[in-house]
């Protein structure tokens, strides 16, 4: 599968697969004898979460929320909007938030604070990609796949204006 010319390859399908496998091993180790609630942030995390869950050897429950701070722009608005909220009770539960990418940290930081107020037994964050150079809000990432440069990335579930999610590799958009 070839990508449009303005896209430049950052991570191959194989590199991503190995990163997801490593994360699954860490989660399997840390959640033995537990039944965590995996909470995916839509839309970007759905491919990552599906691949991750298939590699887990522990019982899990899943839930999804949809947050937005980008719209159709390539830069966050800084204002978080809950498009589809939490439906599961999380008080006293082990909750693992699954996020595709932590960029400025504003969106996921907002969501983690929201979840903390609901008093889960434990709350951790698993992110496949991290751009620490763009951080505006401090966010602890408990399980991290890859640290990437401060470029706008697409593929493997991440999009630009709803395009490029289907690509199995990670690309950056060349300006």
Image (cartoon, rainbow, N blue to C red):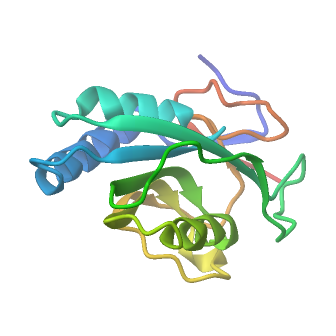
- Residue 139 shown left or right of residue 174 in the figure: left
- Residue 151 shown left or right of residue 139 in the figure: right
Residue 100 x/y as whole percent: 54, 48
Say whether residue 170 is visible.
yes
Say whether residue 12 is visible.
no
Please give the name of the residue rendered at 9% of the width and 47% of the height, measured from the top-left corner.
Answer: 33
Q: Quadrant of residue 7?
A: top right
Please give the name of the residue rendered at 60% of the width and 68% of the height, measured from the top-left corner.
Answer: 114
Counting the numbered discs, the total is 0
Please give the name of the residue rendered at 64% of the width and 41% of the height, measured from the top-left corner.
Answer: 42
Most foreground residue, 20 or 7: 20
* Quadrant occupied by the N terminus: top right
- Residue 98 shown left or right of residue 122 in the figure: right
Residue 105 x/y as whole percent: 62, 71
Please give the name of the residue rendered at 30% of the width and 26% of the height, measured from the top-left corner.
Answer: 54
Residue 22 x/y as whole percent: 23, 47
């Amino acid at each position: 599968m070839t990508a449009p010319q303005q896209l430049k390859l950052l991570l191959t399908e194989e590199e991503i697969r190995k990163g997801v496998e490593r994360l699954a091993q860490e989660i399997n180790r840390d959640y033995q004898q537990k039944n965590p609630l995996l909470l995916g942030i839509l839309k970007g995390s759905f491919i990552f979460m599906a691949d991750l869950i298939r590699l887990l050897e522990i019982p899990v429950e899943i839930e999804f929320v949809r947050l937005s701070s980008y719209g159709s722009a390539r830069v966050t608005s800084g204002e978080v909007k809950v498009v589809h909220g939490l439906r599961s009770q999380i008080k006293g539960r082990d909750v693992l938030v699954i996020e595709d990418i932590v960029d400025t940290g504003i969106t996921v930081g907002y969501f983690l604070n929201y979840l903390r107020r609901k008093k889960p037994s434990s709350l951790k964050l698993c992110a496949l990609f991290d751009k620490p150079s763009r951080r505006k809000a401090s966010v602890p990432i408990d399980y991290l796949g890859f640290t990437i440069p401060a470029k706008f990335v697409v593929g493997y579930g991440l999009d630009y204006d709803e395009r490029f999610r289907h690509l199995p590799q990670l690309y950056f958009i060349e300006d």
